[in-house]
Amino acid sequence: MAHGTARLLDDARDGRAMVWVIAIMLFLTVLAAAMGLATRNAATALERSLAGRLTVQLTSGAPGVREAAGARLAARLRATPGVTRVTPVSRAALADLLRPWLGADSADPALPLPVMIDVDLADGALERVRAVVAQIAPGARIDAHATWMASVAGMLSLAMWLGAGLVGLMASATAMVVVLAARGGLEAHRATIEVMHMLGATDVQVARLFQRRIARDALVGGVIGGAAALALVAVIGARGAGLGSELLGGAGLGAGAWVTLVLLPFGFVLVAMAASRVAVTRALRRIL
Amino acid sequence: MAGGQRVGRQTAPPMANIVQFENVGLRYGTGQETLSDLSFNLASGAFYFLTGASGAGKTSLLKLLYLAQRPSRGIIRLFGEDAVTMPRGRLPGFRRRIGVVFQDFRLIPHLSIADNIALPLRVAGVPEADVAGPVKEMLAWVGLGDRGAGRPATLSGGEQQRVAIARAVIGRPEILVADEPTGNVDPDMADRLLLLFDSLNRLGTTVLVATHDLHLLNRVPEAQMMRLDNGRLQDPTGGLLHPPGGRG
């Protein structure tokens, strides 16, 4: 009875508040989801870049001995299976790092600086690197970057789950709003529903009317709220990319994330339809 | 039956009982019984008037009949099936076999007159291509052939009642129930409405008209009369328990 009964529920009896409520919910939901997805991407990028990276520091011995040991160690590391890159940090680069604290003194040739070697390695090569370092420079220290960035990664993970939780909460709140709207609609259209029942309409037929109405409102609201949020996400993304930050660069949204965000309003339409159907059929069961 | 003359045609062959009430009682909430000990049968194809003073329980009885209400006690059989314990999911199918004309018409104001009349067909899932023809036929039958596009509010009370009748009968129900159908119309219109009911009854539909207008009773000589007094049915001749049948 789709065509002929499409206008059975009088539009004039319902405000369009539902559209705007859904629009606001979807705006916030898409933003929360974008935050979650971007944070996940950032966490993944950070983990990928730090998981196989470490720095070897040689601090003991006379400067000349240290440098010779560093050179020998770098050569051995390059020949070690699983090591993908070995980059001795130059004295100039170290002086640059110290300049904020020491000023011009950081370039003093007499300043005792450790020999540092950055190493990138594949999975499972850490133990081999430890063995080589222990053999060539027993006093050297190995700093795995993942260790000291673990708290940052944890924070990013928390933000990602927070985003997922917000999306879940918003979906629940939307379902509740729809249930309230459906109940209000049942009351507003009680006379029409009674007539339909007396003419032999089933609960499913009546529920379908509300489902169709709510789906339309949710779709319009979802498109408005979703489009506004996507535009805002795109602007924020463009600004973040403009900063040139490695961390913010990793937080960009890939094609999959954009598809997820675009599909989110349609998912909410399905949630709204299901919620309205359940609410209306439950309420109708109380009527004979 | 008070004043219980049974005016049905005595020579008609006995017809199957389409409605059977046995010791039916109805109580709203915890109050007194609105209807008590109703026992009667309605024969298929017969015409009945249900009379009684205001508050006698006519509308409550009709509600039991068109399945808007379940009784507090007793047995109701509709079309040979127990309507009291019938699962809720089966009620719509039975309701489609009963046409109802409400006292207050209950037309849907924002739908066109034609769409109001078409509603039972659409509820029953009749394909849209098969709706327009019967609607046009019904509009002509109730004398509103050129008014289908208008809204109910543009019609007089009598015209609205005719739309309600058209809506009630378009699905060719086996029983037509009308609650005070002439309550809001002038005597001429009441006669015209009754003619519509009569013509429908001649096509085989069982008709039950609730009215307190005693003048109407003489308009359909073959009709049988049921009278409610304080929620109890008067049937001194037993004609309602053993109805003589319809027009055959």
Image: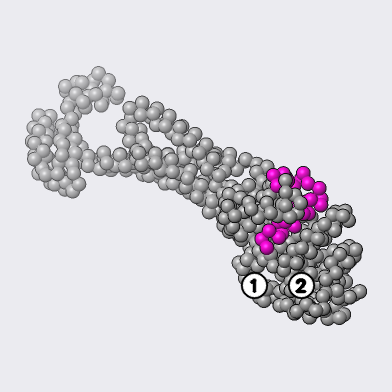
**Residue A89 magenta-highlighted:** no
Tell whether label 1 touches label 2 (CB within 8 Å).
Answer: no
Bin the neighbour count of mark 2 within 10 Å (Cα to Cα): few under 14, some 14-19, many 20 and up.
many
Measured as percent of width and height from the top left, residue A132 is found at 11, 43
The residue that mark 2 highlights is B247
Instruction: Say which chain tag 2 marks.
Output: B
Q: Quadrant of residue B50?
A: bottom right
Identify the residue at image location x=27%, y=20%.
A103
Magenta segment main secondary structure: helix
Measured as percent of width and height from the top left, residue A174 is found at 55, 47
Question: Which three-letter amino acid code belongs to the residue tagged 2?
Answer: Arg
Q: In the image, is residue A1 above or below residue A53?
A: below
Element under disc 1: loop
**Residue B155 magenta-highlighted:** yes
Instruction: Say which chain tag 1 marks.
Output: B
Residue B86 numbered mark, or none = 1
Q: In the image, is residue A38 above or below residue B45?
A: above
Measured as percent of width and height from the top left, residue B112 is found at 69, 46
From this viewpoint, is residue A101 visible?
yes
Camera-near label (2 vs 1) is: 2
Q: Quick one: label 2 or label 1, which is nearer the N terminus?
A: 1
Question: Which three-letter amino acid code belongs to the residue tagged 1?
Answer: Met
Identify the residue at image location x=76%, y=59%.
B101
Bin the neighbour count of mark 1 within 10 Å (Cα to Cα): few under 14, some 14-19, many 20 and up.
few
Q: Which residues are magenta?
A: B147-172
Are labels 2 and 1 assigned to the same chain?
yes
